[in-house]
Amino acid sequence: MKTIKQIWSSFLLLLMASVALNCAEPLEGNNSKNENEDAQGELIASEIDLTGKKIGYCTPTLNAPYYQALFQSVKANVEKNGMVFLSADGQDDINKQVAAVEDLITKGVDALLLNPKDPEALVGVTKLAKKAGIPVFILDSSINPDAEYVTTIQSNNRANGALAGEWLAKKFGRKKMNIALLSGNAGNPVGRTRKQGLLEGITEEQLRSIGYIDLDVKTQMYTEWSYAGGLKAMEDVLVAHPDINVVITESDVCVLGAIKAIAQAGKTDDILIVAAADGQKEAIKYIMDTDFYGCTAMNSPVQIGKNAVEFAIQYMNGKRDFPKTSFTAPLLITKQNAAKYYNPKAIF
C-alpha cells in the first residue's frame, strides 16, 4: 500500500508531465490574466491616421512560451490599430538577430521594437536605425546605454525581486535559511537585477523584523533559462548541499524543471521555492495547489507588448519626453491572490 508521501510524489510527477506538455516610472495597466488576453489587442488613442504604418518587431527567439506570448501581444496590438506588423526571429543566435534587424530597417519600418539577445551586440543596429530615422524601443531585456533608443519597456525586475525576497524573510523569521540560487545565465542584466532585488528584499526585511542579517547562499547554479537546465542544476545542488531548505530563482522557468528533482528526492516538504519573476501559468498553478512553491512576481509579456506599441504610437504622434526606462507595476503572486492571475488558456 502506498504511503501518503508516495501518493504525493506520484501526483507531483503527473502534474509536471502536464506542465512539460503545455510547455524609473511605473506604467498603468492591468496585469491580471483575462481569458483570451494573449490574442486580443487594444485600440490606442492617436491623432494621426495609423493605417499603413509599419511596426517591426525582432525577438531573440520564439523557442519559449514567454517569447511567443510577447510576440502575439505585439502583433495583436499593432494590427488592432490598423498598422502593418513585420516580424523577425533571431533564432537564439546573435548574428542572426543582427541580420534580422538590418532587414527590418531596410524594409523601412516606422518604428522598431527590439528584444535584444545581448546588451552589447545589438548596439550597432540601433545606430543604423537612428540614421534611417527609425525610433527604437527596447522590450523586456536591456541594452547598453550607448545604443540609440527611445525607452526600455520592461517589468520592474528589482522591485519584483524585492517583494519576493521580503515575503521569504517574513515566512522564515528567525529560522535558518540554507539557500540555493538558480540563475538564468552568467552576465545576463535582467537576471542580475532580479537577483539583486531578491537579496535586497531578504536582508531589508530581516533588518526590519529581527534586527540582523542571516543570509547564507550555499551555491549559485546556472540553468540557461530552461526546464532541462533547472532539472540538472537542482540534481547537482541536492548532491552537493543536501541541507538546502530554500531555492530562490531569477525566473519561474529556471525552477520548473528543478521541481522534478526535488520531488524525486522526496524533499517537497523540506524545500520552499521563491521566484523573482515571471508569473508563468505553470508556476501559478503550483502556488495554488501546493505549499512548496511560495511565490513569484508578475512579468507580463501581454502588458509589455501592449505598452511598447502604445509608446510607438505616441512617438509617431509627436511625443518625445519618454523616461529612459518604463516599468510595469511590480506585483507579487502568492496563494492568496494566485487564482486571480491564473489563466490556463494563456500561452505563458
Image (cartoon, rainbow, N blue to C red):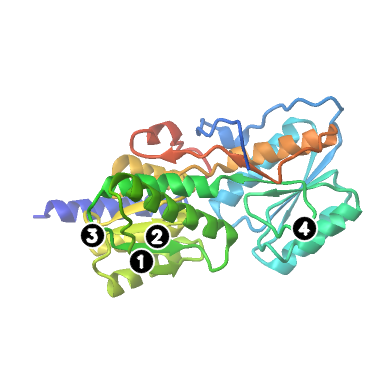
User: What residue is shown at x 76% (from left), y 25% (from top)?
Assistant: 45
Label 3–label 4 contact, CB within 8 A: no
User: What residue is shown at x 44% (from left), y 53% (from top)?
Assistant: 200
Considering only order in the chain, which callout, 2 or 1, is on the residue closer to the N terminus? 1
| Disc 4 to disc 2, C-alpha distance | 35 Å
Q: Nearer the viewer, mark 1 or mark 2?
A: 1
User: What residue is shown at x 76% (from left), y 30% (from top)?
Assistant: 81
Q: Residue furthest front?
A: 211
- Residue 329, numbered label: none
Q: Residue furthest bottom?
A: 240
Q: Which residue is mark 3?
A: 267
Q: Residue furthest right?
A: 132
Considering only order in the chain, which callout, 4 or 3, is on the residue closer to the N terminus? 4
* Amino acid carrying mark 3 in the image: Lys
Helix, strand or loop at mark 3: loop
Q: Which residue is mark 1?
A: 234
Q: Which residue is mark 2?
A: 257
Q: Nearer the viewer, mark 4 or mark 2?
A: 4
Considering only order in the chain, which callout, 1 or 4, is on the residue closer to the N terminus? 4
Measured from the top left, where is residue 181 in percent x and y? 40, 63
Q: Nearer the viewer, mark 3 or mark 2?
A: 3
Give the quarter of the image for residue 126. bottom right
| Disc 1 to disc 2, C-alpha distance | 8 Å
Considering only order in the chain, which callout, 2 or 3, is on the residue closer to the N terminus? 2
The crowd level at tag 3 (other Cα within 10 Å; few <14, some 14-19, many 20+) is: some
Label 4–label 1 contact, CB within 8 A: no
Residue 147 higher or lower than 29, as above or below: below
Residue 161 higher or lower than 259, as above or below: above
Q: Which residue is mark 4?
A: 147
Helix, strand or loop at mark 2: helix
Q: Nearer the viewer, mark 3 or mark 4?
A: 4
